[in-house]
Image (cartoon, rainbow, N blue to C red):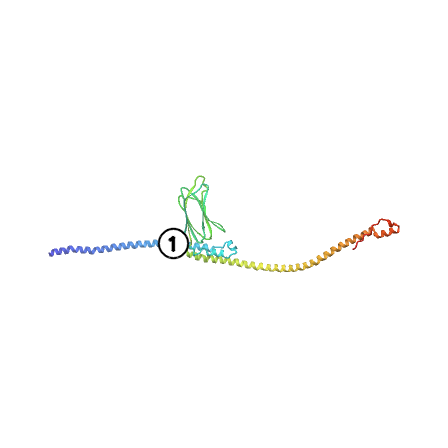
Amino acid sequence: MPEANTLNSKEDAPQDQTNIKEPHIMSQGNTESEEDDAEEEEEEEEQVEEKSNGSDSETEAIALATKAADESYVPSQSLMSSSSPYPLIRSVDGISLKKYNPDPSRFSAKDVIVPLRGKLNVPIHVTVSGSIVDYTVESKDFDIGFGVVAEREEGVTVVKERQRQNAHVEAITGRFLVGSVPCALIFTFDNEYSWFREKKITYKIKVTPPSFENICSGRRIRAKSALAVVAKDKESAETRLESVSSKHSTLVQDIERLEMELKEKKKSLGVFEKEVSWLKDRVQLREVQEDLLTRRLTEGWEDEDIVVGEEHGGSGSNVDEVERVEI
């Protein structure tokens, strides 16, 4: 029995040792697993950090581009010419934050046919300054002409020069920032060069509005720019106002002086008109007198002929009575 117990003890001993070792081995396994998990977590953290850094870099680049666009903001001629102060203010304010929606607008179409010897224009209207536009264009089997322009009141800006591209081999992609608004982005798919083939194109366009922070900072930048333009225009207007006011005062004085002269001349005119009327009557009177006197001198006096006729016994002669003209 003791031997059995001993054996049992010997046989149990390895089992105990095994039991002791197994936890030890398990402990090593957990450590290795924890190290792998830690490495994976580090890799994930690095990837997240890289993505975060990339996202931060992209966000910073967009913020810088938006700032540059806002700093180049100049109120249009129509805004400066408006008789109302509010169109300019609305242009500076931009989108109302009460209506602000950070979700991007998406425009897409698949296998759209561009006819041979023709082209397709896709207009997209952008009203929020600082919006980011991303686009992807693909064609099926053949190349396609592609370009983008921005149409504004001030004119047309070429965003991407139109040219033929192998969009059936590699998709056309691009990204740009819209500074001045409102504007119409015209995406043109050109197949006018092809005499034999129509083309099929697929496009995806995304317009992402600026962030809340960029909107707020953009307002302030545009306000400063607009304020400088308004102040300069006000200074110019004040200078012109001073000059024009001086000329206006001079003209008013000249007009007052001329009105006084005109009043005096009108008085003189009345005197002259009376004198003219009197002199006309006098001239007419004298003309009649001249005629009567001239006739008497040339033809004689009729009463003299009557008296002479009576002296010669010409009482029976037919003599007209003397015409008497009372003057």
Q: Where does residue 107 sit, x and y in percent of width and height?
A: 42, 48
Kind of residue at disc 1: Ser
The residue where tag 1 is placed is 55
Above/below status of 150 relative to 230: above
Numbered disc total: 1
Comparing 292 with 273, the one in front is 292
Does the image show residue 137?
no
Q: Secondary structure at mark 1?
A: helix
Residue furthest to the left in view is: 1
Q: Residue at 38% of width from left, 54% of height from top?
A: 55
Quadrant including the C terminus: bottom right
Q: Where does residue 89 sit, x and y in percent of width and height?
A: 48, 57
Residue furthest to the right in view is: 312
Quadrant including the N terminus: bottom left
Q: Where does residue 26 sit, x and y in percent of width and height?
A: 23, 55
Q: Is residue 4 left or right of residue 101?
A: left
Q: Where does residue 195 sit, x and y in percent of width and height?
A: 45, 39
